[in-house]
Amino acid sequence: MPESRPPIELHGISFAGLQKLIDERRLPPVDQWNPQRCGHSRMRIAADGTWYHEGAAIRRPAMVRLFSTVLRREPDGRHVLVTPAEKLDIDVERTAFRAVAMQTKGDGRGRRLAFQLDSGDAVLVDRDHPLRVVQTDQGPSPRILVRHGLEAELSRALYYELAEAALAEGADPPGIWSAGTFFPLDGP
């Protein structure tokens, strides 16, 4: 069955409205499914967020949104697509999602941050969905925990925007507040 929910857009929506949309998303309980049938999906998510099956890009956004709803990350770091009947590995080059737009309200300790994801979802940065910076061979990789161990990597432009706000506020170490929690931007 194709994904029929429209993607969440940040433009023109309040934080309360965004939280309501996120809460209304009835995602499958993939954290509760542990089927015996396992294998590999022959799928991968490239570093730029493009989903591939057997080497061909998946061009239907609704199909990508559907697959993203049954994705989780295992404790050993593997990414899997899981249903009640089977669990299939999927190769992920960097992170499962990309944060492509940001909304901010307030400043300092009163700031709230929200990110729109390339999967059509959105996430509010808070204690349960922390922002962190991971050092990689390609440099710092700012990431947000989305759900089930899955992360979204911020685009470089969004990272620079966050860094500019953090530097303007003068915290030491540099970082940003969201929903009453401070998130350092200087990496581990």
Image (cartoon, helix red, strand yellow):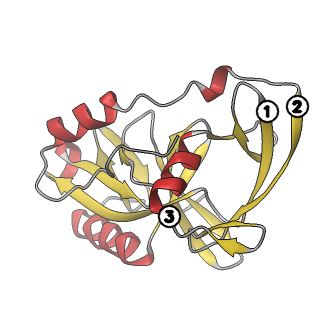
Instruction: Tell me the residue at 25%/55% (across/down).
Output: 9
Q: Nearer the viewer, residue 38 or 97?
A: 38
Left or right for 172, reference 21: right
Query: How many residues crowd around disc 2 within 10 Å: few (fewer than 14), some, or many (20 or more)?
Result: few
Mark sitting on residue 86: 1
Please state if 155 lies on the left or on the right of 10 as rendered: right
25 over 88 or under it: above or below? above
Residue at numbered disc 2: 37
* Label 3 sits on residue: 60
Q: Amino acid at mark 3?
A: Arg
Q: Position of residue 129 (x, y in %)?
A: 45, 40
- 42 lies left or right of 163: right
- The residue lying at 16 percent from left, 38 percent from top is 17
Residue 174 in the figure: left or right of residue 53: left
Q: Is residue 127 above or below residue 102?
A: above
Q: What's the residue type where badge 1 is placed?
A: Glu
Give neighbour class at mark 3: few <14, some 14-19, many 20+ (Cα, 10 Å).
Answer: few
Three-letter residue code for mark 2: Arg
- Give the spatial CA distance, label 2 vs label 3: 27 Å
Which image quarter is the C terminus in?
bottom right
* SS for dot 2: strand
Q: Is residue 59 above or below residue 113?
A: below
Tag 3 or tag 1, which sits nearer the N-term? 3
Horizontal and vertical percent position of residue 115: 34, 55
Vertical placement of 73 versus 175: above or below?
A: above
The residue at the point 71 percent across, 24 percent down is 84
Residues marked 1 and 2 touching at CB (< 8 Å): yes
All told, the count of numbered labels is 3
Q: What SS does tag 3 mark? A: loop
How packed mark 1 is, by other alpha carbons closer than 10 Å (few <14, some 14-19, many 20 or more), is some
Q: Is residue 132 visible?
A: no
